[in-house]
Every structure is written in structure tokens, then in C-alpha cells.
């Protein structure tokens, strides 16, 4: 007797699944409100008219809210792509705000590869009517296995050093040293693995690689079209499903180098925008399930827009949570990624009415307890345009979080702002004001993702080169050190900028917490004062590898500074420094006055209780213009390792040089680090 699933299909898993025992494909699509669903199966040549159309009978091909069917592979000969047409009720109020259009060709939300026909046109998905031949299609999954060669996940903990990069911008420039066919692709990253190893980072954080709309107009990838498929534009191969193989190869090769892979993921909104935006997938399949909506006083329905992008995913809905969970598990299990940075993660805490659930939003529990995800790195951007949840306010209690307080306050101190000493101490210690170092909370210092520059804002170098655009300068805590921009910079100004960038690197990598820096900051990448390049794909934002020559000493400093951090686990420990840190001023106690711009601290390296057998470290920081004498408050002998005021190679030494006497002149706007051998 033939089983019911063989005849009718199964409701789970959603998407397309190959059933090996039957040599068949199972198709499953969730739509709570649909009353008619058609599966469209396309060949390679005619992308407007399907080879086969399967009308799903709700009495045979529906289980609760999931429409499904099964087809033998022999029945699908010549089929390469698939999509759906869905019809349902007219729009009503509240969460009955439907946007069904029976003429629209719709992409499966669970498709693992997306094909864009030659006549693809975003405009065809705007407004009512057919978009046949111009709509993105799902790719029927390939059945060939990938050889992972015994690949295992990389699980760094408190020793994590994150390198944030944009796949295309990283190697797109002809001077990247990457073959022309590989520039701006996953393969380009593979080609640069020796560089990443030499630099010393332990993880790459890739800006969004989920498939996004190539005609939407942005270049960063934050306007997601599909949460399973890798973006085909980042593949060096022509075949759309080859992007999967290339991505897997990249992950495998990075893992061989001991480098973890973290994806920047955007589950808070999609590229479909507001009610005037394109109808590609979620809107036409089940709008009021996937998006948060509200009814205005005039009776009109609107999309909630707590993301600032036109729509907000309805993460309180069980189906949306299922979509997110299945996407995360797919990237972990099938693609072997090691973690995720969640863009605008505060959306996960919103109830259906837009209010915040601070107590126990279900998705946090589901992610952190899932056996496939619980060992993954989980990093949150803990805010959105309407709410700021950094620290213990964020419901993902054990997640790491982007710490913009570290970014702003450390840069303000380095710039020379007054009143910043206490704040600098807090940030260097691990931000225990945000992640309390108390038995009630038992937080870890590494939960703070310490960064000074990211994709969103000035590059690290531009923070030293641009100040005249007041709003941008204020937002980025920038100062130009006496000369605006890149043209004809006086040598003394350039030397000062290089010193400041070294100060940034030193403090970032000396602080307890998880350091992250933006690709190219290690050789003073510039965007010529642009701090929001989301829509630019041009040479001015591609990494300029020629700057490696001009700013080689900065690259060397970053490299040596990373090595210094790795060599001294007393800095980047699992817990806070606690009794192992002492704070000093230039002579004795810390000067906490408003006008103070100096700070020193001592970190003890020997602590058997914490498993530490390290050298002691003494750090002196001067944000005054003039040199300041620091009296060493701990007995020597001390060896000076770092002095950002000195030119390379004296700025950072391997063995160091002895410090005579009991003090050291720290140069203006300088950082000095000494080590007391065990």
C-alpha cells in the first residue's frame, strides 16, 4: 500500500526536500490564509510559462496551514526552477491585512538557491498583475554531496578576535592580488586566507550573504530577499546553485586555518518594503503572518516600521520563528557556519502589537536551547531606531552584544575630550556597568563586543581625517588633527594620525571583552569622509590594498598587537579582571577630575585560581598634547614593549627594552605598555 505522504506530500520540512527512499521531491509551503495554491515548475528555456502547473487540492494537499505535494524525480525531467501562485481573501483590518495576488509568481521562503531570469525586473513585482518571466525563482536542489573533508566547527570563546568584512568590497579592487574572476567573491576570501592568518584574526564576520535583490539599489546586503540562499553575486561561478558549493568551500578552508565564520543576518525586515513595495514572496504568500501591521485612526492598514526600512518581521508569530530557526540551523548544519551577528536584534523582543517583551520573548529561548544552535556564537546589535537595549536590558542574557558605548567613549578619550577617565576605565575593564560582574548576573567580560569602527560609520582612519562636516564628525567622534581630508596632508599631521590609529588599535586589543575591527582599518582604509555607503559599489569603498605600502607600519602594529593579546591571556580572560587589576594615575591614585586626560593600569598575570601563568602588564595612556611623566607604581624590572609615539619598528617590540628608573615619559596622545617578566 502506498503511504499517504507518497501520494499527497508531507507538511514538514517546509521548502523542497529530496526523499531518497522514493526518489522524489517533497514541496511544502505555509500559508495560514490562502484558499488556493499552485506549484509552478519551470524548465531552463521558457521562464515565463511553466512546464508543469500543480494545483494543490486543500482536501488532499493541505495539512492545517501547510500546503504540500510530492513528485517523483522522473516526473520532473527538464525541471530546473520552481515558484508558487497563491490566492486568498481581500485585505481586512488588523492581522487580516492580506495582499494576495493570484497573478504573482512567488518565491518559496525556504528556497536554498535563487535564480534571476535574464528578464528579471523589480518593477514587475510592484503593484498588481503578473510578473511571469520577470520574477526570482527557487532552484530545484542539486543532489550531489559536498566533501567537507572532516570539517569541524571552530568554537573560540574569550580569545575571539573578529574581523568584519564585506565579501565584495574585500577583494573587488584590482590591486587586491586576487585573480580577476575571483574578485569580490567567496573564492576571493579563500585566496586571501594566508593574509588573514598572517594578520592573526580568529574569526571573520561577513556582512549579509543571504540572497538580496540585485535591483533594490543598496550594496551592503541588508535588504534580504531569502534567508537560506547565499547571494549569487558573491559567487565566481555562473550556475546559481554553485554559489552553495563555493560558500561551503570557503567555510571549509577558513576552518582549516582555524578561523571561525560568523554571518551578519537580517531577520528583522526584508526587501519587500512597505505596502507600496514589491510582492516577491512573503507578502503574496501570507502577508499578515510574516509582517507586523497596525490600523491607523483613519482605518487604513500600515506596515509597522520599527526598523526604518519599511517593514518589520512578525517575530512573535510561530511561523516566523520557525522560519528563522530553520534558516539558522540550515546555515549551521548544512553550511557549517560558527555563529551569527543579528542585525537590529531588539526586534526579536517585540510583541504582535509592537510592545516590548522584556521578560521572555520565545525566540531567545528557542535559539539558545536548540541542540544545533546552542554552541554557536550569538551576537546582537541590541537596538533599533526606537529602542536601545544594550546590556542587561537585552533579553538574550547570555548573548554577546555590539557595545557602541565602548566605540564612542574610547574614541572620545583618545581625541582628548574632558571628563572621560572614569568611562575609559569602565570600557577597558569589560563594561561591567552593562554586563554586571555580580553573582546575581554572572556575566562574562567577553559578552561586550568592543569595536571602534564598523561598516556603519567612518573607517578608523577617517575618524582622524575628517571633522568639518559637523554632524558626521560628532556622530563618529572624529577629528582631523589640523588638516581636513586626504589631499596634500602635511607630514606632521599624517604622523599624528598614524599615532592615533595605533592608539585605537592598542586600546581595543588591551581591553577585556571581545575585540572587533573593520577590514582595512589595519592599513588605514579610507572612504574619503563618507560614513554611510550602503548604496555604493565603487572603487572608493573597495579595500585599497595599495595602502598596505603607504601605511605598512600601521599594518605591522595591528599584527603585532594581535599577537601581543594572544600571548597574554591575562588580558582576554573569561571573567573580569577583578582583584588582578589596579588603576593608577601619573603619580599614585587615578586623577578622576573633569580635566584629567591620563590613566594607567596594572594587570597581574599570575593567578592559579584562574589558570593564569602570564607576565604582568603595565599600561600608561596620555591624551594630552604634551608628554607626561608616569611614575611606575609597581616595582620592576619593567620592559617597554609598546610606545605609539615612536616610529616603526620601535613602536612595538617583541622582547622590549628595559625601562631605567621608576618612570617613563609617555608622549602626547600616546599609549605605552610595559611587561614585567615572570
Image: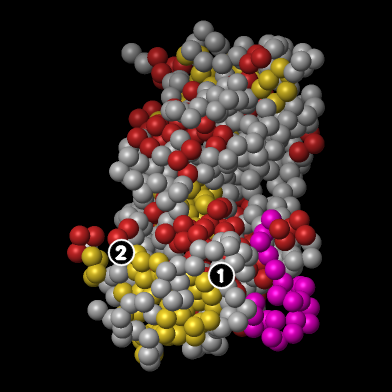
- Left/right placement of residue 224 relative to residue 148 reads right
Instruction: Give the alpha-carbon distance from disc 1 to disc 2, as whole Å.
Output: 23 Å
Q: At which x and y percent is residue 627?
A: 56, 83
Residue 167 picture quarter? bottom right
Is disc 1 surrounded by few (<14), some (14 to 19) or many (20+) residues within 10 Å? many
Residue at the left extreme, as displayed: 608
Residue under label 1, please give it. Answer: 597
- Vertically, is 395 above or below 1? below
Q: Secondary structure at mark 2?
A: helix
Judge depth for marks 1 and 2 and give the one in front.
Answer: 1
**Residue at 70% in and 52% down:** 534
The answer to which of 170 and 393 lies nearer the viewer is 393
Is disc 2 surrounded by few (<14), some (14 to 19) or many (20+) residues within 10 Å? some
The N terminus: image quadrant: top left
The C terminus: image quadrant: bottom left
Whether residue 483 appears in magenta in the rendering, the answer is yes
Q: Is residue 576 among what the camera can see? A: yes
Q: Is residue 29 among what the camera can see? A: no
Q: How many marks?
A: 2
- Left/right placement of residue 211 relative to residue 613 reads right
Q: Secondary structure at mark 1?
A: loop
**Residue at 43% in and 21% down:** 10
Residue under label 2, please give it. Answer: 580
- Left/right placement of residue 368 relative to residue 8 reads left
Residue 667 disc label: none
Task: Please report the bounds of the magenta region as a residue range.
Answer: 475-498
Q: Earlier in the sequence, mark 1 or mark 2?
A: 2
Amino acid at each position: 500500500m502506498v503511504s499517504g505522504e507518497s501520494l499527497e506530500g508531507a507538511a514538514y520540512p517546509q521548502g523542497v526536500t529530496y526523499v531518497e527512499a522514493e526518489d522524489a521531491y517533497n514541496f511544502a509551503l505555509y500559508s495560514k490564509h490562502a484558499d488556493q495554491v499552485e506549484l509552478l515548475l519551470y524548465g531552463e528555456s521558457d521562464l515565463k510559462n511553466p512546464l508543469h502547473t500543480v494545483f494543490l487540492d486543500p482536501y488532499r494537499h493541505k495539512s492545517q496551514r501547510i500546503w504540500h505535494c510530492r513528485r517523483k524525480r522522473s516526473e520532473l525531467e527538464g525541471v530546473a526552477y520552481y515558484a508558487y501562485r497563491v490566492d486568498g481573501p481581500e485585505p481586512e483590518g488588523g492581522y487580516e491585512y492580506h495582499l494576495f495576488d493570484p497573478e504573482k509568481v512567488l518565491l518559496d521562503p525556504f528556497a536554498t538557491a535563487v535564480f534571476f531570469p535574464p528578464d528579471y525586473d523589480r518593477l514587475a513585482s510592484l503593484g498588481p498583475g503578473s510578473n511571469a518571466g520577470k520574477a526570482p525563482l527557487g532552484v530545484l536542489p542539486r543532489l550531489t554531496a559536498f566533501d567537507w573533508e572532516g570539517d569541524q566547527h571552530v568554537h573560540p570563546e574569550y580569545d575571539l578576535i573578529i574581523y568584519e568584512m564585506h565579501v565584495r568590497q574585500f577583494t573587488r579592487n584590482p590591486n587586491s592580488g586576487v585573480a580577476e574572476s575571483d574578485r569580490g567573491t567567496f573564492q576571493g576570501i579563500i585566496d586571501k586566507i594566508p593574509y588573514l592568518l598572517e594578520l592573526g584574526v580568529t574569526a571573520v564576520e561577513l556582512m549579509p550573504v543571504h540572497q538580496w535583490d540585485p535591483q533594490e539599489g543598496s550594496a551592503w546586503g541588508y535588504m534580504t530577499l531569502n534567508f537560506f540562499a547565499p547571494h549569487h553575486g558573491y559567487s565566481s561561478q555562473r550556475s546559481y546553485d554553485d554559489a552553495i558549493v563555493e560558500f561551503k568551500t570557503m567555510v571549509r578552508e577558513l576552518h582549516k586555518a582555524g578561523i571561525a565564520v560568523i554571518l551578519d543576518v537580517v531577520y528583522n525586515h526584508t526587501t519587500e518594503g512597505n505596502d507600496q513595495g514589491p510582492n516577491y514572496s512573503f507578502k503574496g504568500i501570507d502577508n499578515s503572518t510574516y509582517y507586523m501591521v497596525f490600523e491607523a485612526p483613519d482605518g487604513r492598514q500600515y506596515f509597522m516600521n520599527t526598523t526604518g526600512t519599511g517593514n518589520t518581521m512578525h517575530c512573535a508569530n510561530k511561523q516566523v520563528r520557525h522560519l528563522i530557526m530553520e534558516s539558522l540551523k540550515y546555515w549551521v548544519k548544512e553550511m557549517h557556519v560558527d555563529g551569527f551577528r543579528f542585525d537590529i536584534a531588539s526586534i526579536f523582543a517585540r510583541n504582535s502589537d509592537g510592545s516590548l517583551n522584556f521578560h521572555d520573548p520565545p525566540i531567545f529561548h528557542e535559539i539558545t536551547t536548540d541542540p544545533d544552535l546552542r554552541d554557536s556564537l550569538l551576537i546582537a546589535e541590541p537596538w533599533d531606531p526606537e529602542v536601545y537595549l544594550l546590556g542587561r536590558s537585552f533579553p538574550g542574557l547570555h548573548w554577546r552584544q555590539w557595545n557602541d558605548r565602548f566605540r564612542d567613549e574610547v574614541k572620545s578619550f583618545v581625541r582628548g575630550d574632558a571628563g572621560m577617565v572614569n568611562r575609559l576605565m569602565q570600557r577597558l575593564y569589560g563594561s561591567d556597568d552593562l554586563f554586571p560582574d555580580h553573582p546575581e548576573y554572572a556575566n562574562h567580560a567577553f559578552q561586550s563586543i568592543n569595536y571602534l569602527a564598523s561598516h556603519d560609520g567612518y573607517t578608523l582612519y577617517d575618524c582622524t581625517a575628517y571633522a568639518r562636516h559637523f554632524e558626521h564628525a560628532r556622530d563618529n567622534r572624529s577629528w582631523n588633527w589640523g588638516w581636513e581630508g586626504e589631499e596634500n596632508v602635511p607630514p606632521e599631521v599624517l604622523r599624528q594620525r598614524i599615532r592615533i590609529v595605533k592608539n585605537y588599535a592598542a586600546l581595543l586589543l588591551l581591553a577585556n571583552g571581545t575585540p572587533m575591527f573593520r577590514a582595512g582599518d589595519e592599513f588605514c582604509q579610507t572612504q574619503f569622509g563618507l560614513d554611510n555607503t550602503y548604496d555604493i559599489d565603487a572603487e572608493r569603498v573597495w579595500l585599497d590594498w595599495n595602502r598596505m605600502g603607504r601605511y605598512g607600519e600601521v599594518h605591522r602594529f595591528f599584527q603585532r598587537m594581535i599577537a601581543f593579546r594572544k600571548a597574554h591571556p591575562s588580558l582576554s580572560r573569561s571573567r573580569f579582571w577583578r582583584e588582578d587589576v589596579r588603576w593608577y594615575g601619573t603619580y599614585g591614585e587615578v586623577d578622576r577630575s573633569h580635566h584629567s586626560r591620563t590613566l594607567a593600569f596594572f594587570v597581574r598575570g599570575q593567578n592559579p585560581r584562574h589558570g593564569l601563568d602570564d607576565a604582568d602588564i603595565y599600561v600608561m595612556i596620555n591624551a594630552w598634547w604634551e608628554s607626561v611623566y608616569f611614575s611606575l607604581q609597581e616595582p620592576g624590572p619593567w620592559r617597554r614593549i609598546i610606545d605609539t609615539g615612536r616610529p616603526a619598528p620601535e613602536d612595538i617590540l617583541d622582547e622590549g627594552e628595559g625601562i631605567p628608573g621608576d618612570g617613563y615619559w609617555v608622549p602626547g596622545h600616546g599609549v605605552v605598555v610595559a611587561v614585567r617578566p615572570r
